[in-house]
Amino acid sequence: MADDALLDDDRLTDDLPEDGGRPDDRIDDERMDEENTLKPQFVRRVEDALEEGDDGAVYDLVEPLHPADVADLLELFDREDRRKLASAITDLMTGDVVAELNDYVRDDMMEDLPAASVAQIAEQLETDDAVQLIEDLDEEDQQAILAELDDEDRIAIESALAYPEETAGRLMSRELVAVPEHMSVGDLIDFLRDGRDLPQDFFEVFVVDERHHPVGTCQLSWILRTPRSVALADVMKRDQTLIPAMLDQEEVGNMFQKYALISAAVVDESGRLVGQMTVDDVVHIIAEEAGEDALLMSGAGDGDINEPIRDAYSARVRWLVANLGTALLASFIIALFGAAIEQLVALAVLMPIVASIGGNAGTQTMAVTVRAIAMNQLTRSNTKRILWRELRVAMLNGATIAVLIGLATGVFFTPLLGGVIAAAMVVNVLVAGLAGVLVPVIFDRLDQDPAVASSVFVTMITDSMGFFAFLGLAVASGVVG
Amino acid sequence: MADDALLDDDRLTDDLPEDGGRPDDRIDDERMDEENTLKPQFVRRVEDALEEGDDGAVYDLVEPLHPADVADLLELFDREDRRKLASAITDLMTGDVVAELNDYVRDDMMEDLPAASVAQIAEQLETDDAVQLIEDLDEEDQQAILAELDDEDRIAIESALAYPEETAGRLMSRELVAVPEHMSVGDLIDFLRDGRDLPQDFFEVFVVDERHHPVGTCQLSWILRTPRSVALADVMKRDQTLIPAMLDQEEVGNMFQKYALISAAVVDESGRLVGQMTVDDVVHIIAEEAGEDALLMSGAGDGDINEPIRDAYSARVRWLVANLGTALLASFIIALFGAAIEQLVALAVLMPIVASIGGNAGTQTMAVTVRAIAMNQLTRSNTKRILWRELRVAMLNGATIAVLIGLATGVFFTPLLGGVIAAAMVVNVLVAGLAGVLVPVIFDRLDQDPAVASSVFVTMITDSMGFFAFLGLAVASGVVG
């Protein structure tokens, strides 16, 4: 049973450095491929052993894996096999494995465990990982688990949960090394040598005043290079990047990137040091924030392959319904020109081309704009310049495509119709460039995530304008009637 | 003149920790906003001072900025103003600023400098930054700069350039701390204290054998916690993640994320330690790799707002031409049903809806699949399960949209036409789900980047199938004729 394993303290406390598994050796062995993912042959052997009910064989196969790879293995299976696997490797289901699991998979596995077992896992984790473990559970389960924790852990987790999701206060680790300014390098080393309650890994030491406000920071490499007698005040860097506890995780990620941080102090509103963010946690945030734009722009929601089908459906269908609305608007515009189409069916044949290319051009510009906004590269200071840049690209793109489709249409239909479609194409690609910049910029100014809402609007504009420009120009130019 | 500044050694060597600027103080001052970007008012003041030719005022405004913010400021301006700014703040154009510049902006600025100046900047940078500085220049310029470098730097840079772009060997830093196994903690601390040639910052010490093969690694925090007399062999972790020099940067990023690394040893084919990757460089790779999928899927190429217009045009127009091809294929299918459309113009009005919703559904599935492939979450071991999952989501989505559009069409046109469009919608959304998974998976198996090529094919399939299913079913069902 998985919960027996998770109740067993011994299995949860082995987080000494020596227990990190052997990622290096495994790069070219029979378990991992060159991309450092589990080989299908290996996964199949685990599957076969599970099917035969040979838990011993399963255990032997999984035992040499790094906790992160055990988590990967669990994620590869469906719900039922995952349960079987967890109960076959109870000894190996450490806190480290649980911390590495995909959110959805972890929540799914935790829901089956009694509150006391989840609490026992939470106690073995650092605060930030413990918070992740329980933040998505419903209120009632959370309370049941919190009640099982000892006071210190409960208070730490409750204080994290008091901050909004995706802020530094929620995500920070409360374990850190903070020392007073009057220490010397030697004092500090002695303090660390007999220090209990130190975090497992840490990369800098924060120097604080008597109000616990940060006054400086020392990277460990500076301490190691400095003679014992030197005062910390002479080694530390006074200027440091402080992260307000209410800062959004996307901005935390941007700060880590911009200032090449390894760790940074988190301060509350009064300026007190309340925690630290370390880059190993921030890389996940950076990857998530950078990767989610593609998913958000397509309306795929979280876009996690482990998301329950119900959630994936509800996220995606909402967007499809919105797009149905824009498609109906486009249809309405086509309907206005029904008589023209009846006269010249070539219009129906050609009209999707103008809309489609406009949609693509708009999506390109929008993707560039959304990315630049997310990276803080596009600000009020250069919006005009970037808009002008995009319009020039759009002019070149529009002209190129217009010539191609104009010539083809001129040959297969009539030169006049070729001229009409070329003109409509130029108009629509220019409109697409304009919309591709302005729609995300406007949403950003309105404090809306430009990646979420822009697509529907840009598509609506390019679709409608595509049909309107082409059919309208066709009527105006006298191609029909 | 900018090149005078860059020739001045003094200005390039100030990379002591104290010189990091004051990011913390600036969060709420008049220069930076709460997202840690330069305030438009501040940028405008710099602009105004530049216009008035008041270089002193410009200097005073820029001087308190962190190098990363100076780089941001340069990027905000167009080419001409950037030049003016650089020459007004020559003293502040340090190697740190140059290293933080966007690739395109840096290349543009470097092209104007004589080889000797670029060489002098390169010498002040760590190898990895120096390589970035010159890797995109043309062969001739590269040679001219390399000839100006001293032997040690030239050899280091040439050996980096010998590795392919975007591999660990190209990106790694050659500065690291490697010590023999027989050392004690005390020996190591003494070595570090009088060590010259140490990297500016480092986060772990690599322990090597006499062939310079890594045998273990010590995080600095473990060293600081351990008494002097303890042997390094008893502190170090023998199992470490080694990065092959030929590993692609995307996989390097995945390894850092998966194993929560701060730094890692890079080894050549014979297993010799040749460099290290540190997480502050890897975060840029992770952000770039995660963010580029949205750009690649839209066909926006690098999608950098600083990319020259010519390059942006050539990257994007290629994709638009490819999409013109798929749009022409769709038009050809419509043309097959010209007679039906002539009879019933409602078909022309409604047909884009089926194609458009199919396209959106396909893009959603494709975005999820591409992301899962990039994160190594979708492997041969679970492709079938994920395909089945996506088809179930597609069935739910298709059914929902089919009911909505079927009813609306039934009311405004005829019930039979409502049935036709509903059936076509279900078919096309299912096809979209299938294509959204299979197209990227197949490209991945063929060792092609799924983000680059998938869109064109998925769109082609959903467009063509949308028109074909709707018009074909209309003819088959006897709605027309």
Image (cartoon, coloured by chain):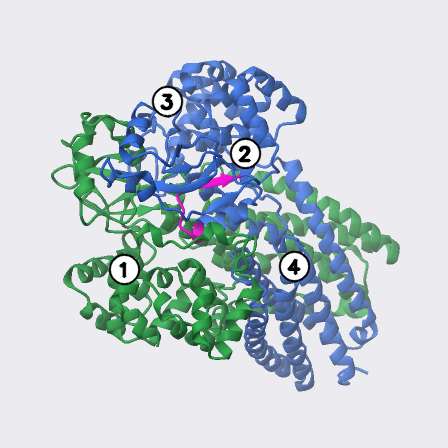
Chain colours: A green, B blue
Per the image, the residue denoted by label 4 is B445
Instruction: Using the numbered discs, state the Cα–Cα distance from disc 4 to disc 3 in whole angstroms.
Output: 48 Å
Per the image, the residue denoted by label 1 is A13
Instruction: Using the numbered discs, state the Cα–Cα distance from disc 3 to disc 1 in whole angstroms.
Output: 40 Å
Callout 2 environment at 10 Å: few (<14), some (14 to 19), or many (20+)?
some
Which label sits in the foreground, 4 or 3? 3
Which label sits in the foreground, 1 or 2? 1
What's drawn in magenta, residue-wise? B257-267
Q: What residue type is labelled 3?
A: Arg
Question: Is B261 inside the magenta-drawn segment?
Answer: yes
Up-down: is B475 above or below A109? below
Per the image, the residue denoted by label 2 is B103
Disc 1 sits on a residue from what chain? A
- Name the residue rendered at 54%, 31% in the picture: B132
Marks 4 and 1 on same chain: no
Which label sits in the foreground, 2 or 3? 3
Circle 1 sits in a helix, a strand or a loop, which is it? loop
Labelled pair 3, 1 in contact (Cβ < 8 Å)? no
Q: Which mark is residue B196?
A: 3
Disc 4 sits on a residue from what chain? B
Nearer to us in this view, B34 or B231: B231
Task: Report x, y in % for residue B418.
Answer: 65, 82
Q: Which amino acid does label 4 sit on?
A: Arg
Q: Which amino acid does label 2 sit on?
A: Asp
Nearer to us in this view, B34 or A226: A226
Up-down: is B8 above or below B230? above
- Name the residue rendered at 62%, 28% in the picture: B137
**Left or right of residue A40, residue B241 in this image:** left
Instruction: Using the numbered discs, state the Cα–Cα distance from disc 1 to disc 2 in whole angstroms.
Output: 46 Å
